[in-house]
Image (cartoon, grey):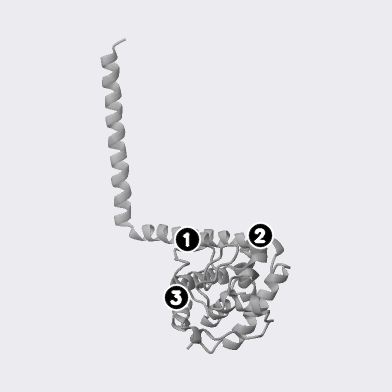
Amino acid sequence: MDVTGINAIMGRINAIQQRIEAIDSFSSGLTKKLNPASDGREKAAGFQSVLDEAVKRQDIKVQQRADRDKLDNRPLAQAGKGPGEMLPPAAANGYAPIINAAAQRNGVDPGLVNAVAAVESGYNQNAVSSAGAVGIMQLMPETAAYLGVNPYDAASNIEGGAKLLGSQLRQYNGDVAKALAAYNAGPGAVEQYGGIPPYTETRNYIQRVMDIYRQTSGTGMK
Protein backbone atom coordinates (compact mmCIF):
# COMPACT_ATOMS: atom_id res chain seq x y z
CA MET A 1 0.00 0.00 0.00
CA ASP A 2 1.32 3.41 -0.97
CA VAL A 3 1.10 5.30 2.35
CA THR A 4 2.60 8.41 0.83
CA GLY A 5 -0.21 8.59 -1.72
CA ILE A 6 -2.89 8.13 0.96
CA ASN A 7 -1.40 10.88 3.08
CA ALA A 8 -1.39 13.17 0.07
CA ILE A 9 -5.07 12.47 -0.59
CA MET A 10 -5.98 13.09 3.07
CA GLY A 11 -4.10 16.34 2.98
CA ARG A 12 -6.06 17.50 -0.06
CA ILE A 13 -9.36 16.53 1.64
CA ASN A 14 -8.44 18.55 4.74
CA ALA A 15 -7.53 21.55 2.58
CA ILE A 16 -10.89 21.36 0.78
CA GLN A 17 -12.77 21.17 4.11
CA GLN A 18 -10.95 24.24 5.39
CA ARG A 19 -11.89 26.17 2.24
CA ILE A 20 -15.55 25.16 2.63
CA GLU A 21 -15.57 26.32 6.25
CA ALA A 22 -14.02 29.63 5.26
CA ILE A 23 -16.66 30.14 2.55
CA ASP A 24 -19.47 29.34 5.03
CA SER A 25 -18.06 31.82 7.53
CA PHE A 26 -17.76 34.53 4.88
CA SER A 27 -21.29 33.85 3.64
CA SER A 28 -22.75 34.10 7.15
CA GLY A 29 -20.96 37.38 7.80
CA LEU A 30 -22.04 38.80 4.45
CA THR A 31 -25.68 37.88 5.14
CA LYS A 32 -25.63 39.77 8.44
CA LYS A 33 -24.10 42.81 6.78
CA LEU A 34 -26.64 42.80 3.95
CA ASN A 35 -29.56 42.08 6.27
CA PRO A 36 -28.77 43.45 9.76
CA ALA A 37 -32.43 43.25 10.70
CA SER A 38 -32.22 39.47 10.74
CA ASP A 39 -29.41 39.66 13.26
CA GLY A 40 -31.52 42.01 15.38
CA ARG A 41 -34.42 39.59 15.23
CA GLU A 42 -32.13 36.78 16.37
CA LYS A 43 -30.97 38.85 19.34
CA ALA A 44 -34.54 39.81 20.24
CA ALA A 45 -35.63 36.19 19.99
CA GLY A 46 -32.72 35.22 22.18
CA PHE A 47 -33.71 37.73 24.86
CA GLN A 48 -37.32 36.58 24.79
CA SER A 49 -36.14 32.99 25.13
CA VAL A 50 -34.08 33.94 28.19
CA LEU A 51 -37.01 35.83 29.71
CA ASP A 52 -39.37 32.91 29.08
CA GLU A 53 -36.88 30.59 30.75
CA ALA A 54 -36.70 32.92 33.74
CA VAL A 55 -40.47 32.82 34.07
CA LYS A 56 -40.35 29.03 33.98
CA ARG A 57 -37.66 28.99 36.63
CA GLN A 58 -40.01 30.95 38.88
CA ASP A 59 -41.98 27.68 39.07
CA ILE A 60 -39.55 26.66 41.79
CA LYS A 61 -41.74 28.71 44.09
CA VAL A 62 -44.57 26.19 43.71
CA GLN A 63 -42.78 23.80 46.08
CA GLN A 64 -41.51 26.65 48.22
CA ARG A 65 -44.66 28.74 48.64
CA ALA A 66 -45.00 27.72 52.31
CA ASP A 67 -41.62 29.29 52.93
CA ARG A 68 -42.67 32.69 51.61
CA ASP A 69 -44.20 33.64 54.99
CA LYS A 70 -40.92 32.93 56.79
CA LEU A 71 -38.95 35.90 55.49
CA ASP A 72 -36.56 37.52 57.90
CA ASN A 73 -37.95 40.89 59.01
CA ARG A 74 -41.05 40.59 56.87
CA PRO A 75 -43.64 42.96 58.45
CA LEU A 76 -46.78 41.25 57.18
CA ALA A 77 -45.61 37.79 58.17
CA GLN A 78 -44.25 38.70 61.59
CA ALA A 79 -46.88 41.19 62.65
CA GLY A 80 -49.70 39.02 61.35
CA LYS A 81 -51.30 41.90 59.51
CA GLY A 82 -54.31 41.01 57.43
CA PRO A 83 -55.42 42.14 53.96
CA GLY A 84 -55.99 45.86 53.65
CA GLU A 85 -53.54 46.98 56.30
CA MET A 86 -51.09 49.34 54.65
CA LEU A 87 -47.33 49.19 55.01
CA PRO A 88 -45.36 52.44 54.88
CA PRO A 89 -45.34 53.87 51.33
CA ALA A 90 -42.26 53.35 49.20
CA ALA A 91 -41.52 57.06 49.35
CA ALA A 92 -40.78 56.75 53.06
CA ASN A 93 -38.25 54.04 52.29
CA GLY A 94 -36.44 55.94 49.54
CA TYR A 95 -37.31 53.55 46.71
CA ALA A 96 -40.06 55.53 44.95
CA PRO A 97 -37.86 56.93 42.13
CA ILE A 98 -36.35 53.49 41.48
CA ILE A 99 -39.77 51.81 41.44
CA ASN A 100 -41.15 54.47 39.10
CA ALA A 101 -38.30 54.13 36.62
CA ALA A 102 -38.25 50.32 36.66
CA ALA A 103 -42.04 50.12 36.24
CA GLN A 104 -42.04 52.53 33.30
CA ARG A 105 -39.19 50.69 31.56
CA ASN A 106 -41.11 47.44 31.78
CA GLY A 107 -44.62 48.71 31.04
CA VAL A 108 -46.00 48.08 34.54
CA ASP A 109 -48.07 50.39 36.75
CA PRO A 110 -45.68 51.74 39.44
CA GLY A 111 -48.44 51.19 41.99
CA LEU A 112 -48.37 47.45 41.26
CA VAL A 113 -44.60 47.19 41.60
CA ASN A 114 -44.87 49.16 44.85
CA ALA A 115 -47.56 46.85 46.20
CA VAL A 116 -45.56 43.73 45.37
CA ALA A 117 -42.47 45.20 47.04
CA ALA A 118 -44.52 46.03 50.14
CA VAL A 119 -45.96 42.55 50.50
CA GLU A 120 -42.88 40.61 49.42
CA SER A 121 -40.41 42.21 51.81
CA GLY A 122 -41.73 45.46 53.29
CA TYR A 123 -39.11 47.17 51.06
CA ASN A 124 -36.37 45.31 52.95
CA GLN A 125 -33.45 44.64 50.61
CA ASN A 126 -31.85 42.47 53.30
CA ALA A 127 -34.83 40.11 53.47
CA VAL A 128 -33.97 36.52 52.57
CA SER A 129 -36.49 33.69 52.71
CA SER A 130 -35.64 30.21 53.92
CA ALA A 131 -36.19 29.15 50.30
CA GLY A 132 -33.46 31.56 49.17
CA ALA A 133 -35.56 34.36 47.64
CA VAL A 134 -33.65 37.62 47.92
CA GLY A 135 -34.30 41.32 48.41
CA ILE A 136 -37.12 43.78 47.94
CA MET A 137 -38.87 41.86 45.16
CA GLN A 138 -37.87 38.44 46.57
CA LEU A 139 -36.20 37.04 43.48
CA MET A 140 -34.75 33.56 43.42
CA PRO A 141 -31.05 33.85 42.45
CA GLU A 142 -31.60 31.57 39.44
CA THR A 143 -34.46 33.73 38.21
CA ALA A 144 -32.41 36.89 38.71
CA ALA A 145 -29.57 35.39 36.69
CA TYR A 146 -31.87 34.65 33.75
CA LEU A 147 -33.33 38.14 33.99
CA GLY A 148 -29.83 39.59 33.92
CA VAL A 149 -30.10 41.41 37.25
CA ASN A 150 -28.19 41.38 40.53
CA PRO A 151 -30.68 40.42 43.28
CA TYR A 152 -28.32 41.69 45.97
CA ASP A 153 -28.48 45.26 44.65
CA ALA A 154 -31.72 47.10 45.51
CA ALA A 155 -32.16 48.93 42.20
CA SER A 156 -31.30 45.83 40.17
CA ASN A 157 -33.61 43.70 42.32
CA ILE A 158 -36.51 46.07 41.69
CA GLU A 159 -35.69 46.10 37.97
CA GLY A 160 -35.83 42.31 37.88
CA GLY A 161 -39.14 42.19 39.73
CA ALA A 162 -40.67 44.78 37.40
CA LYS A 163 -39.37 42.90 34.37
CA LEU A 164 -40.84 39.64 35.65
CA LEU A 165 -44.19 41.26 36.44
CA GLY A 166 -44.27 42.84 32.98
CA SER A 167 -43.62 39.50 31.33
CA GLN A 168 -46.35 37.79 33.35
CA LEU A 169 -48.86 40.55 32.66
CA ARG A 170 -48.22 40.11 28.94
CA GLN A 171 -48.48 36.34 29.27
CA TYR A 172 -51.89 36.62 30.92
CA ASN A 173 -53.18 39.48 28.73
CA GLY A 174 -53.11 42.07 31.49
CA ASP A 175 -54.87 39.93 34.11
CA VAL A 176 -53.26 41.31 37.27
CA ALA A 177 -54.54 38.55 39.58
CA LYS A 178 -53.11 35.80 37.38
CA ALA A 179 -49.83 37.66 37.02
CA LEU A 180 -49.58 37.95 40.80
CA ALA A 181 -50.43 34.27 41.21
CA ALA A 182 -47.63 33.40 38.81
CA TYR A 183 -45.22 35.70 40.67
CA ASN A 184 -46.06 33.99 43.96
CA ALA A 185 -46.68 30.35 43.04
CA GLY A 186 -45.10 30.09 39.60
CA PRO A 187 -46.60 30.08 36.09
CA GLY A 188 -46.79 26.29 36.16
CA ALA A 189 -49.32 26.39 38.98
CA VAL A 190 -51.45 28.91 37.09
CA GLU A 191 -51.39 26.73 33.99
CA GLN A 192 -52.09 23.58 36.01
CA TYR A 193 -55.27 25.01 37.54
CA GLY A 194 -56.30 27.11 34.57
CA GLY A 195 -56.18 30.26 36.70
CA ILE A 196 -55.41 31.21 40.28
CA PRO A 197 -54.29 28.06 42.14
CA PRO A 198 -56.24 27.04 45.27
CA TYR A 199 -53.33 27.74 47.61
CA THR A 200 -54.33 29.70 50.71
CA GLU A 201 -50.97 31.48 50.82
CA THR A 202 -51.24 32.53 47.16
CA ARG A 203 -54.82 33.76 47.48
CA ASN A 204 -53.94 35.76 50.61
CA TYR A 205 -50.91 37.14 48.80
CA ILE A 206 -53.01 38.36 45.88
CA GLN A 207 -55.51 39.98 48.26
CA ARG A 208 -52.77 41.79 50.16
CA VAL A 209 -51.13 43.09 47.00
CA MET A 210 -54.43 44.14 45.44
CA ASP A 211 -55.53 46.00 48.59
CA ILE A 212 -52.37 48.11 48.52
CA TYR A 213 -52.47 48.44 44.73
CA ARG A 214 -56.04 49.79 44.73
CA GLN A 215 -54.99 52.52 47.13
CA THR A 216 -52.00 53.59 45.02
CA SER A 217 -53.06 52.77 41.44
CA GLY A 218 -53.55 55.82 39.28
CA THR A 219 -51.96 58.14 41.81
CA GLY A 220 -48.38 57.33 40.84
CA MET A 221 -45.42 57.04 43.14
CA LYS A 222 -43.92 60.23 44.56
Closest to the camera, between mark 3 and mark 1, is 1
Q: Residue beneath label 1, please?
A: 145
Please report the residue visible at 49 percent of the width from the left and 86 percent of the height from the top.
Answer: 91
Q: Is residue 93 above or below residue 140?
A: below
Please report the residue visible at 46 percent of the width from the left and 73 percent of the height from the top.
Answer: 154
Q: Quadrant of the N terminus?
A: top left
The three-letter amino acid code for the residue at tag 3 is Arg
**In this orientation, which residue lies closer to the viewer: 144 or 24?**
144
- The local crowd at label 3, few if under 14, some if 14 to 19, many if 20 or more residues have their Cα within 10 Å, is few
Disc 2 or 1, which lies upstream in sequence? 2
Residue 34 shown left or right of residue 197 in the figure:
left
Please report the residue visible at 48 percent of the width from the left and 77 percent of the height from the top.
Answer: 103
The three-letter amino acid code for the residue at tag 1 is Ala
Please report the residue visible at 69 percent of the width from the left and 68 percent of the height from the top.
Answer: 195
**In this orientation, which residue lies closer to the viewer: 23 or 129?**
129
Q: How far from the left and from the top, in percent, is residue 200? A: 73, 71
Q: Residue beneath label 2, please?
A: 63
Q: Is residue 18 above or below residue 188?
A: above
Q: Residue beneath label 3, please?
A: 105
Q: How far, Cα to Cα, is label 2 from label 3?
A: 31 Å
Q: Element type at marker 2?
A: helix
Closest to the camera, between mark 2 and mark 3, is 2
